[in-house]
Image (spheres, rainbow, N blue to C red):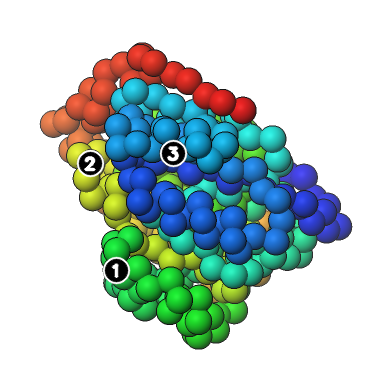
Amino acid sequence: MLIRPNNPIPSAFSIIIPTWNNLPFLKICIESIRKFSKFDHEIIIHINEGSDGTLDWVKSEGLKYSHTQKNIGVCMSVNHLVSLTANEWILYVNDDMVACPGWDTSFTSAVASTNTDLALFFSTLIQPKIGKSKHMVEHDFGSTPETFDADGLLQHCLDEPRNDSEGAASQPTLFHRKWWQIVGGYSLEFSPGMSSDDDLLMKFWIAGCRHFRVIGACRFYHFVCKSTGRIRHNKGGRVFVMKWGITQGEFFKYYMNALSSTPPSELVAQHSSLFPRATLIGKFRRAGYGFFQDYPLQGIEEWDTATGLGYWDHRN
């Protein structure tokens, strides 16, 4: 692990956004990033299909992009985008998210305050419904581009103050390109993408990462599941337990949740005792899935037997 007295403050991020025929949301996302960024960030978009006019719009905006004629899924899209980036620190944003004022200065301050680049940083999401998540703020500013209350979001996005908290959330996710490459990025056995985030957390944990932080002042609004709600879901939970011998719930309960009660420096010192172990439940499930099913190959085959074949294009 590379330890530094302090991380240098990034002058800019590379922002990567995979999109799949979601142009009205993508326009709002890009507009908000441009409007509320202090720094001059690189933006790169992967266009899956683009049959709704996304490709033409991205070209007209002069944005960097890559393009495939079919939907290659989140895992391949994001891995490919990372390979095209110019900056060390990379922010992965979904196309149905809206940046709020101060988002990038909050992230840069968090990076500068951490003594390692082996870290994952997350935004605090604002959503109409948050379920049981403790890392989100519940507020409804609309569920479609037509009902989106941009003025209301601007006025009230910071109404519920939050301190930074140790733990993991969903996108937007900020990471160092070096460590994405070292751990192998998103694993293709989770294509098109369900549970790929939890698998990534496990890989970072095994690499020694104990810095998982949700930034309280960094806010993005999330329209929620505008792409994942349209796609066939892979059985990511089954693939996770087949791969690691522990369920996702147990990984969060016994390991990720320890972050909120133990300082990262102590977690590093306790590395051996906190290294994930296969559980009895995980072993039984692994045996059952292995005997009666064919994971992960079954899920990959059901998604796409040759995801990488076909037309690929990009513009730097």
Q: Which mark is residue 57?
A: 3
Q: Is residue 223 left or right of residue 177?
A: left
Quarter occupied by residue 300? top left
How many residues crowd around disc 2 within 10 Å: few (fewer than 14), some, or many (20 or more)?
few
Closer to the eye: label 1 or 3? 3
Per the image, label 2 sits on a secondary structure element best described as: loop
User: Mark 3 packing: few (<14 Cα in 10 Å), some, or many (20+)?
Assistant: some
Name the residue located 35 percent from the left edge and 68 percent from the top edge: 148
Q: CA distance from mark 1 to mark 3?
A: 22 Å
Q: Which residue is mark 2?
A: 231
Q: Quadrant of the N terminus?
A: top right
Q: Which dot, 3 or 2, sits closer to the camera?
A: 3
Q: CA distance from mark 3 to mark 2?
A: 23 Å
The residue that label 1 is drawn on is 147
Q: Can you say whether 205 is above or below 311 in the image?
A: below
**The image quarter in which residue 50 lies:** top left
Query: What is the x, y in percent for residue 135?
Result: 45, 71
Note whether 115 is above or below 217 in the view shown: above
Task: Say which amino acid is labelled 2.
Answer: Ile
Percent x, y for residue 160?
49, 84
Query: Tag 2 or tag 3, which sits nearer the N-term?
Result: 3
